[in-house]
Image (cartoon, grey):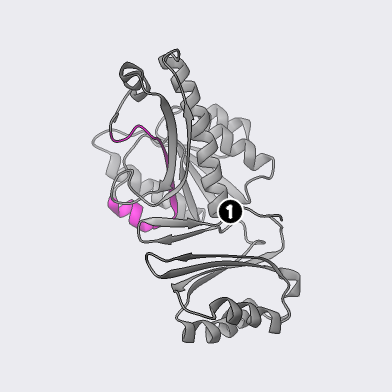
Amino acid sequence: MSENRITFLIQCEDSKGIIAKVTTFFYDEGFNILTCQQFTDNIEDAYFMRVSLDAKDLVMSREELSEKFRQVAEPLKLDWRVYYSVDKANVAILASKTSHCLFDLLEKHSEGKLHCNIPLIISNHETVKYVADQFNIPFHHLPVTADNWVMQQGEMKKLLKAHNTELVVMARFMRILSSDFINSFKEKIINIHHAFLPAFQGANPYKRAYERGVKMIGATAHYATDDLDEGPIIEQDVERVSHASSPAGLTQIGSEIERKVLSKAVKFHLDHRIIVTGNRTIVFPETEG
């Protein structure tokens, strides 16, 4: 994504003339519209829009632009947010013992493929510390027991607040976050899990999937909510397998899909391509630029 963009995410009830009024406003204010994507949900009678502007055309303060757009938005009853790509979000990554998702995120970040800062990694195990060290990211080990989990979540929240965290990524973090924790970061926690849920919960899902002779493996990335593994889905992928696949082979395939799906979901969030509506997401696809 360009380093010099302004992105508006808009949702409202569907009605005539919305796109004309919005784009006319930006034209009249002298902005070059780089992309304009829209989706009409005929079932819910809802309209969604993502407009990306060239920020070099901004000749007023951010506050003035927001106030001017508000005068257009209120009569149309638009629910909207505006983002500036020069503002890099601070992202915290939570991980446990497995490293594939964590490593993939840090590698993509180091290559400039994820537009963010990663000021800290938190883990309930020291197993993945070597990954954090490899990428020179501060690592915080918060060991968890049945008796201290509430307290450790409080420590996590302190760390996240101290680093002005705007997105939390659960990169195979194998603990269930409390409602209080999740609601402190509403629509700002992304989780990844294998797509065998709810059939194969708990430990060794790929072994039990092998025993059942599954023919398909997938992964789901979603926003965390009070309903475990049932939050708004951001990204999914799947791959067919056969009777010839061993439990270890299934695990390897699953790991590859998990890291691909998670990194895509994180990128969509960072690039401001997601609008949450109820328990669904509208995810605008990547276009040129």
Pick the quarter of the image with the N terminus.
bottom right
Looking at the image, which residue sits at the far front?
42
x and y percentages locating residue 118 in the rendered image: 57, 46
What residue is shown at x 58% (from left), y 34% (from top)?
A: 104
**Hey, which residue is sitting farthest left in the picture?**
147
Looking at the image, residue 178 lies above or below residue 62: above
Identify the residue at horizontal 69%, vertical 40% (top origin).
111
In the image, 93 versus 271, the foreground residue is 271
Magenta highlight range: 179-198
Q: Does the magenta run of residues contain 186?
A: yes
Three-letter amino acid code of the residue under disc 1: Pro
Q: Looking at the rendering, in which quadrant would you find the C terminus?
A: bottom right
Q: Position of residue 64 (x, y in %)?
A: 62, 83
Q: Residues within 10 Å of mark 1 (few under 14, many from 20)?
A: few
Picture coordinates of residue 200, whole percent (x, y): 29, 28
Helix, strand or loop for disc 1 = loop
Residue 179, above or below 250: below
